[in-house]
Structures are given as C-alpha cells and as structure tokens.
Image (cartoon, grey):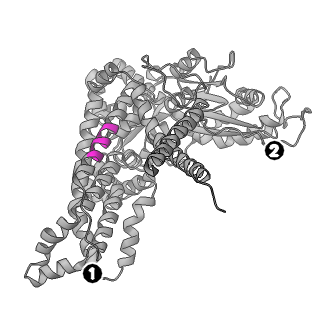
Amino acid sequence: MKHQSERKISGIAIIWGMLLMAVLFAGCTGNSPQPAATAAPLTPAAATPAAPAAHPSAQAPVTAAPTLVPPAPVATTTPAPVYTSSEGNVVAFAAASLKGVSSQLAADYAKMYPGHSVVFNLDGTQALKTQVQNGAYADIFISASNAYTNELTKGGYFADGTVKPLATNYIIVILPAGNPASIRSPADLAKPGVKIAMEDKAVPAGTATCAVLANLAKSTYNADWNTSVFKNVVTYETSEPGVATKVQLGEVDAGFVYESTAIAAKPGTYATLTIPKKDNYLQTYTIGVLKGSQSTGAARDFENFMLSGAGQQDLKEYGFRPA
Amino acid sequence: MASSPAGTDIRRTIALACAAVLVAAVTLYLVLPILSLFLRTTPEIFLASLADPDVKSALALSLTTSVISLAIIVLAGTPFAYVHCRHRYPGKVLVDTIIDLPLVLPPAVAGLALLVLYGRAGLVGKYASMSGFPIAFTTLAVIMAQVFVASPFYLRQAKSLFDQLDPAYEQTARTLGASPARVFTTVVVPLTAGGLVSGAVMTFGRALGEFGATIMFAGNLPGVTQTMPLAVYVNLAGDFNAAIAISIILVAISFAIMVTVRLLATNEVPHA
C-alpha cells in the first residue's frame, strides 16, 4: 500500500538522520579536560567544546626569518629574540587596572621585539580566571590577585617556572573633581548621604578595599565606622575601571581604586584622599605564561619584556610600584 | 527524466533525512547548552544555593522589577500603539523609528545614556537629586532601564496587530454609539489579546534578562539593584554553583512563561 511504504520511508529517513547526528557528535566529545568545579558534577556534560577566545592565527606577518634581529636600543640586556613565523602574536589576559598602560606596553613590546605584537583582553581578574578555566585561549595571564594566581597554579594552568611577580599597587580613594561632598578624611566616608562606589568582593581590588577598611577600622576608627561606610556603598562594580568611571561622571562621591588609576589620570580628573601605608593593602600583580599557549617563544619574550627595564618603566610611568 | 519508483523513493528518503538532520541540529543547538546547566550541578547543591540570601534577594528583585516594568509598558504602550496606528500625525515616521531605537542600541550604551540624563550630574537627574529623589543607583533605575530596553518588543508587536486589525469592527461599534475609549477596551483589545500576550511575554523575558543597562545605570547592590543576570555574572568567579543555580531558575521561569503563553494565546487577529 502507498501509505505503508511512505511510513517506511519516513522511518528510514529518521533513523538515518539520527545516525548522522550521532556520528557528528561523536567527533565533538573527548576534548580539553573540564576544570574541576567547586563540587563534583553528576556526569560530564555530553558536548561542551572549549571556546577559544582570540586564537592567534597562523599567518602573523613576520618579515624576518629565524635569524637574530637586534632589539631596539634599550639600556637593558634582553635575550635576542628567537621566533618562528607562527609566533608573532601574543594574547595577554590582563587585570583591568592595566587598561591605561596597555597601549604603551604594546608599542614598546613591538619596538623591543620587532615583528611581534600583543593583544590584551582586559577584564576583572576573576572574570579572566573563569574564562581560562573554561577553556579560553591565552598566552599570558597577568593577575592582580595572589589568590587567583595560586588557584590557577594549583589547577595546572601555568607553565612551570614562569609565574613571577610583576608590580604592586596600593589602594586610594578618588573623588570627583572639586570634591563636591567635601571628603577630607576617611571619617567623612561614613557621613550619612555620602555615595561610595567600590568593586565587588570577587574583584581583587574589592578584596583589597575590604582589607583596607578593616585595617582602618581596627587602627583608627571603629567597627561602627566600618558599618556606616558599607551602608554608603551604592554599587559594587565588576571591575576596577568601572568604579573610576562612576567617580569621573560625578555619580558617586567617592570610589576605591588603585593608586595607579589616580596617578595616570589626566590632571584635574579626580581629587584624591590617600590612605596611610600602615593601613593600606599592597596588591601584588603576577605574570605567567599559560601551559596551553601555542606561541611559547613570543609569550616568554613578552614576559621578559614586562619584567625588563622597559616594561617596568612603562608601568612606573602609569603609577604602578615595583614588585 | 522518468524515474523509476525506486529512484523516487531514494530521493525522497534523502530529502527527508536532510530535513530531519536540519531540525535536529537546530533544536539541539538551542537545547544542549541549557541541558548542560542541569548536568553541571546536583539537586543538593542546587537547593543549597537557593537558600543563599543573595540568590533569594536577586530572584525577588528580578521578578518584582520585571513585572512592574511589564505593567508600565503594557498600560502605557497599548493605548500609545493604538493611537499611533489609527491616526496620521506629523512626525509619525520619526516616532516609528525612535520606538525601534532601543532594539539596535547596545544595552551598555542605553545604560550610559540613561545615566548621563538621570544621574546626579545629568540634565534631569540634577533636579531630582536636589529635591531628594535620586534616580540612579536605585530600584527605580532598574525599572527604568528595563522599560527602556524592553519596550520595543511590545510596541512593535502591538503596532503590527493594530495595523492588521480590520477597522470595520471599531467603526461599527462607533456607529452603535460607543465612545473611542469603550471601543478600545471592549472591541480592540479582546480581538488582539492573543498577539498582545505573546508580545508581553517577549517583553517580560527581555526585561528579566537585562544586564548591560542595569549595571551601568542602576549599579550593582545586592537587594536593591542586583538583578538575577547581575548575580550570575558576579558569581561566575566567586560562587560558581550559585551562578548555575540562578541560571537554572531563569531557565525554568522562561520555560514556564512560554508554556503558559502557548496554552493561553490561540486567537488570530481578524484581518482587514
């Protein structure tokens, strides 16, 4: 009968279709290892292919062959660069507080290692760490928090021996130009009606700020002051530049950021309120080459550049302290 | 070319197989990521995360603000769309374009724009702040951001429905003595209710998922302005399990809404 044969054909078609799908999906499984979630998952998800972020393409234009090219005249001793044509680009995940200095670093890196270039992915260290743990591709990881660096080291993400301290930074309070709320000392931060912006506690700058406030409460002010300050917080930003933006727009009366942000800003953008060193929290930035990096030569060159006089000079100009 | 019955069968089989693959591929692409959320956690972890006060407050805040935003959009938007469709007025084309603007505007830009206008240093916000009613960084700001980004979804749907609706029904009602307002509430809305509900559902979903404008304009303060999408993003680094729990809740809500709509909205608009 015509109907029966039609139904048979539909059945065959569906079975063929499902077999085809199964074949396609079999090819997708068994890829990069899933990072250990904080609790044991039920079963590994069927197909969650890693999504690389900016994957360096293999056609980076490099003019010189693997002959040694003398680096640009810098008063440092740098190892002569040795690279192959596929290693031209470096993908660097860097803490958001390096936003201001990143273009200078890129330019000077290209000067020191001609033919190389670096592209930065700037975000809160916590966001970058999650991206790396879920398979994002990066050559270099610059972290603003020792805790996150240790977490990635324990997870085996860094190439051995490449994790080095890069710079340090203190916390400072910035105020909109003109200081409209007349904040002259940390005590004024607890005044009712003052609006404060700070980073979320998962952001390294946020952890540092909480520590600073705790130190100040213990040494100079009291626990009530600490509570009042937190009552005045109107937003927990997800990255350090977010706080700076809110202050610059005049939407809040005070914000907690790194000293480097205040130093590198155009004169007149902010008023500042320094916090005594004894109560302050020294944040340490670390740099490391990631194990999954495919351009180990260029990546290590970049790390050398960042640790060399040229890189450190750039960081110093933008307000970072030496490691 | 005369094909034998066997040849036709094979061609039909191949065509059906390709269609089956296409349907399966599209469906799986949309469903698998959502499924993997469920697979990445266990019921115990999920329930434990639900007890987290931050999760609970984000859930309550998201639902409340989205419902309020939807109410504002529907109550103001439906009469607006009706008046816009039934009358010709100078600048109608411009208004048409402006209504669609939030659709193509990146949410972060929308948030920045709202902040620049209604923030403490903004043209309007200056006076609001001085009179003691600050707008930015409040729950009101969350609602305003949601209304701004989600309204095009409803307005476009309402406009298209009213344009399609045969004016004969309204004209008949008018000749029978009903006022324009009565015509609107007793004739037009019931006839278009099905489509309006589905537009409202899309609007609710968009308002519930708003992230960029919220964090820019309203900030991120647990209990006041930290909606569920913000809570997911903030917890991605800290408490991954809380992020997954909130995501699962959002998926469940979306699914429940869609099923409800499918059951409720079955009317077709009587075409002109």
Q: Which residue is mark 1?
A: B87
Query: Which residue of the protein is positioned furthest toward the left in this rendering?
Result: B177
**Given the image, what chain letter belongs to the residue carrying mark 1?**
B
- Residue B154 falls inside the magenta stretch: no
Amino acid type assigned to the residue bearing label 2 in the image = Pro
Residue A282 to residue B210: above or below: above
Q: What's the magenta region?
A: B251-259
Q: Whole-percent x and y of residue B139?
A: 26, 46
Which quarter of the image is occupied by the C terminus of chain A? top right
Query: Which residue of the protein is positioned furthest toward the right in this rendering?
Result: A67
Instruction: Identify the secondary structure beneath mark 2.
Output: loop
Q: Residue at x 46, y 30 (%)?
A: A203
- Residue B255 falls inside the magenta stretch: yes
Q: CA distance from mark 2 to mark 1?
A: 61 Å
Q: Which residue is mark 2?
A: A61
Q: Whole-percent x and y of residue A61?
A: 81, 44
Q: Quadrant of residue A99?
A: top right
Query: Which residue of the protein is positioned furthest toward the bottom in this rendering?
Result: B175
Name the chief secondary structure element in magenta.
Answer: helix
Can residue A108 be seen from the camera position used here?
Answer: yes
